[in-house]
Image (cartoon, grey):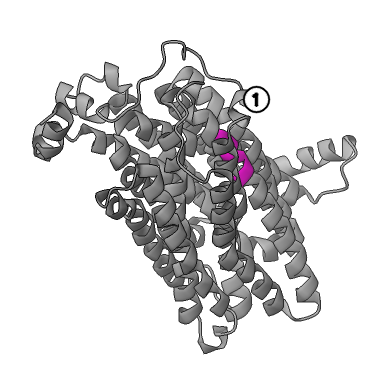
Amino acid sequence: MNQHHLQAAAPAAAIGRYRWIICSLLLFATTINYLDRQVLSLLAPALSKELGWSHSDYANIAAVFQFVYAVAMLFAGRVIDRIGTRRAFALAIAVWSLAAVLHAYADAAGSVFAALLAAVGVAAVPASVAGFMLCRAVLALGEAGNFPAAIKATTEYFPRKERSLATGIFNAGANLGAILAPAAVPLIAESWGWKAAFAVTGATGFVWLGFWLYFYDAPEQQKRLSRTELEYINGDAAPTPAAAAHTPSWFKLLACRQTWAFAAGKFLTDGVWWFFLFWLPLYMAAHYGLSATGMAAPLALLYAMTIIGSIGGGWLPSLFIRRGASAYQARMRAMLAIAIFPLVVLLAQPLGYLGIWLPVLLIGIGASAHQAWSANLFTTVSDQFPKHCVGSVVGIGGMAGGLGGVLITKVAGRLFDHYHALEQIQTGYMIMFTFCALAYLAAWCVMKALVPAYKEIAQL
């Protein structure tokens, strides 16, 4: 029996569990990431009334975040590969936490930013809209570092067979953040005002930063990591060529069909999650007249469902691996099965007359499927690319996903304004839910066409 099989048979306690401490840090970072991101959408119905925003104004604010996030993702991956996971993640959360706090002062900054936009020829933008656009842009710069850094850390601290599970666990932080936000934000806003909601949630990131700097270091330099666990982590890793001393150029990465497959998967499906995140509170307010406090329970249920989807989706490939499939083959089979579940979202609008809970359950299944899909999609990068360029490939795909999100957000804003004027807003939501239902099957087909069979890239 070789060393790898001996390690596989060894009890978990003998191997060590420090990698799961790292996973828990990634979980909490992603929770904070989505907590900060979700505050605006929860306060949007109230802010829209107070500040006079149209659907298109809100869409523009959301789209600025997504566009900057998309572009920043491209560079975030490069920065992480260049300066290392520890420093890059610390920088990212410091920037986004500061930006989250600055939302409390968005109205004050709006007049100045609106004047600057007018000076460069941009059409007149209301001061409040301009201020939130500026704050969302800075927030996006920082938040863009979360997923490339988390995937990089997972690649460094976990063997391939555990990466999708670890990714599913930390990716569940997106759902925890989305659950905590409707539970906490309305209460803070009602008690101390909407500015306090941004300030309090933004400050949590600085607490996490202290834990990150204390606990995280590269595995080879981590004194708390046992030699046995380090060997277990590296047991199924492909050898890194000695020549791979620097991150390959974007042109080299874009020459790989695997890069395009990952980017296509992100472009076609990330917009679905953005849509759920940014528009569901407005959907509940428009269709059922719910306040921010009233929608807390439905949103909590919906995002609680997605935690199961994220972790379960990360675990699902292990079933196929036990039957002899490679890690990549197992993930693609799991993703095909997962892509079927969002079809139930097609029923959310037609059955909406039965009350809010049935649409919440159906959309919750679709949102859970997205998180299951995402946990596996991210891991296809570490399956096929060497460690020294994982961050860059995730950044490229993240940019594609962000641009897809911008497109979906802008289309949604136009659709909803159009059908709202016709007093047929339900038609706009039916169109958007149809896209959300079909996106995953379309994405899987494109990915399979680009990479029909597994092929690891050893030289870059």
| Visible residue check, residue 174 | no
Choose top left, top right, bottom left or bottom right for residue 223: top left
Query: What's the residue type where badge 1 is placed?
Result: Phe
Q: Residue at x 57, y 67 (%)?
A: 437
Question: In this rendering, is residue 96 above or below 351?
Answer: above
Choose top left, top right, bottom left or bottom right for residue 415: bottom right
**Is residue 455 one of those drawn in magenta?**
no
SS majority, magenta: helix
| Left or right: residue 3 compared with residue 118 | left
Q: Residue at x 56, y 48 (%)?
A: 447
Please report the bounds of the magenta region as a residue range.
395-401
Give how far across and how far down residue 136 sits, in percent. 63, 43
| Left or right: residue 267 compared with residue 117 | left
Badge 1 is on which residue?
251
Q: Quick one: quadrant of the N terminus?
A: top left
User: Between residues 358 and 460, which one lies in front from this camera angle?
Assistant: 460
Choose top left, top right, bottom left or bottom right for residue 338: bottom left
